[in-house]
């Protein structure tokens, strides 16, 4: 089946339900890579479907759409509206996205915004086990992107982007612009931008994500982009690290890169999550998606959140979750993401030298 704006939501739902076979994944990847219009429609479809699915509110949303449509005296017959309202989520999205062509549904759009915004706030708070022990995601709100660094501002002006609302951290998977970050950093994004260590800004899009483990893979749109010409200096750990392992991370809780270090204080994350670590290490909003590295320079995890009632209890999802996501990609994309075998370039170096080598591959992720 040909992929188009008219059926992109069908592909999005099948993708979320893991119903695509390898050949279909390859077709999808090629279509998204070759069309910025399709990528925009894809991101919109994924965002809306995922929000609705996560909150189990498909029926409620259909009822809201149906009621609003009747209330606004639209030109579509009642029987047609009722049929649309009973269809699956794959039909819900075309109905919403097609409102400009068929009828004015301002009330529906406004209701959707309010509904999803409230739902997102609820989701961010829902991981709290007790009032005194809450799980806080580390995506930060960006109050003002203005900077004295003229180079960064020039790149933003060239892209003619709207001012970003949220920010997180990402790090290179390849020199060619594949980037790892947290899913929650980009899940509500209309546009995604990556700001490199050299203060250049590039537009990016989502390649794949896994909400359950909170990992995502992005790709910078510019095909000529390169982080560098030499292999990535760090490797990716496939096995879990042990209690007491010393670790460090770099991320963007502010406009400049920030370094933090600590150790694994528990081999399980929040609420005994076996796919995550608990770290004794300071982390702040903006560090979601930052790599956590061991002393040899292997990436062992990605920062995801922190405990609200402490200054230093941080949670990070195992690198294995990221590797599993990459392994689920179409074969041609997997070939493009050739991860380094080890961290030989960093072994034996002082921490200052390690940080210097890694720094060019850490980036700020900004969304609106």
Image: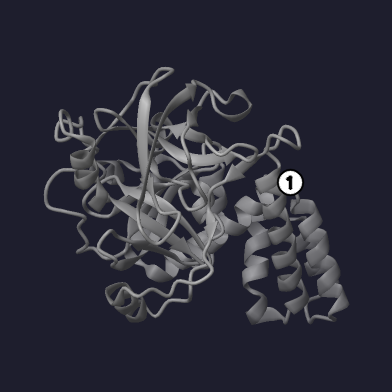
Q: From what the image shows, is residue 35 above or below residue 330?
A: below
Image coordinates for residue 116, horizontal then vertical, percent: 69, 59
Q: How many marks?
A: 1
Question: In this rendering, does residue 43 appear at all?
Answer: yes
Q: Left or right: 166 with respect to 261?
A: right
What's the residue at 12%, 52% (across, down)?
Answer: 229
Crowd tier of the residue under label 1, counting other residues whose Cα lies within 10 Å: few below 14, some 14–19, many 20 or above: few
Image coordinates for residue 145, horizontal then vertical, percent: 45, 71
Which secondary structure, mark 1?
Answer: loop
Image coordinates for residue 150, horizontal then vertical, percent: 29, 77
Q: From what the image shows, is residue 81 above or below residue 28?
A: below
Q: Where is mark 1, residue-wise?
A: 56
Question: 83 or 213, which is in the foreground?
Answer: 213
Question: 324 or 342, which is in the foreground?
Answer: 342
What's the residue at 26%, 49% (across, down)?
Answer: 359
Which residue in the rendered view is the most extreme toward the left?
A: 230
Name the image colouring: one colour
Question: 59 or 182, which is in the foreground?
Answer: 182
Q: Left or right: 60 with respect to 221?
A: right
Image coordinates for residue 93, horizontal then vertical, percent: 64, 62
Q: Left or right: 44 with respect to 325?
A: right
What's the residue at 42%, 47% (across, down)?
Answer: 181
Question: 92 or 151, which is in the foreground?
Answer: 151
Q: Quadrant of the N terminus?
A: bottom left
What's the residue at 56%, 39% (across, down)?
Answer: 311
* Figure quadrant of residue 300: top left
Question: In this rendering, does residue 18 appear at all?
Answer: no
* Figure quadrant of residue 198: bottom left
Q: From what the image shows, is residue 266 above or below residue 39?
A: above
């Amino acid at each position: 089946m040909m992929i188009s704006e008219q059926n992109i939501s069908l592909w999005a739902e099948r993708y979320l339900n893991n119903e695509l076979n390898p050949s279909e994944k390859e077709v999808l990847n090629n279509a998204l890579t070759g069309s910025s219009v399709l990528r925009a429609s894809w991101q919109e479809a994924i965002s809306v479907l995922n929000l609705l699915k996560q909150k189990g509110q498909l029926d409620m949303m259909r009822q809201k759409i149906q009621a609003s449509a009747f209330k606004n005296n639209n030109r579509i017959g009642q029987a047609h509206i009722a049929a649309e309202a009973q269809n699956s989520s794959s039909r819900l999205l075309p109905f919403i996205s097609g409102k400009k062509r068929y009828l004015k549904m301002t009330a529906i759009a406004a209701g959707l915004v309010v509904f999803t915004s409230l739902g997102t706030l609820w989701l961010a708070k829902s991981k709290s086990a007790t009032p005194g022990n809450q799980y806080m995601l580390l995506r930060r709100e960006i109050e003002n992107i203005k900077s004295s660094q003229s180079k960064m501002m020039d790149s933003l002006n060239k892209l003619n982007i709207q001012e970003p609302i949220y920010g997180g951290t990402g790090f290179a998977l390849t020199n060619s612009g594949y980037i790892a970050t947290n899913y929650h950093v980009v899940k509500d994004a209309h546009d995604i931008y990556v700001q490199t260590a050299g203060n250049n800004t590039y537009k990016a899009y989502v390649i794949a994500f896994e909400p359950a483990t909170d990992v995502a893979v992005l790709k910078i749109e510019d095909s000529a982009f390169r982080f560098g010409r030499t292999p990535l200096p760090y490797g990716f750990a496939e096995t879990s690290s042990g209690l007491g392992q010393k670790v460090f991370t770099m991320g963007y809780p502010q406009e400049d890169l920030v370094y933090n270090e600590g150790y694994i204080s528990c081999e399980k994350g929040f609420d005994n999550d076996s796919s995550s670590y608990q770290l004794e290490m300071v982390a702040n909003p903006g560090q979601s998606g930052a790599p956590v590295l061991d002393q040899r320079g292997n990436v062992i995890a990605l920062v995801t959140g922190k405990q609200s009632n402490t200054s230093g209890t941080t949670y990070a999802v195992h690198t294995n979750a990221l590797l599993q996501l990459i392994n689920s990609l179409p074969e041609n994309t997997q070939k493009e993401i050739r991860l380094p075998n080890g961290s030989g370039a960093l072994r034996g170096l002082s921490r200052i030298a390690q940080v210097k080598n890694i720094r060019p591959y850490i980036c700020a992720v900004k969304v609106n």
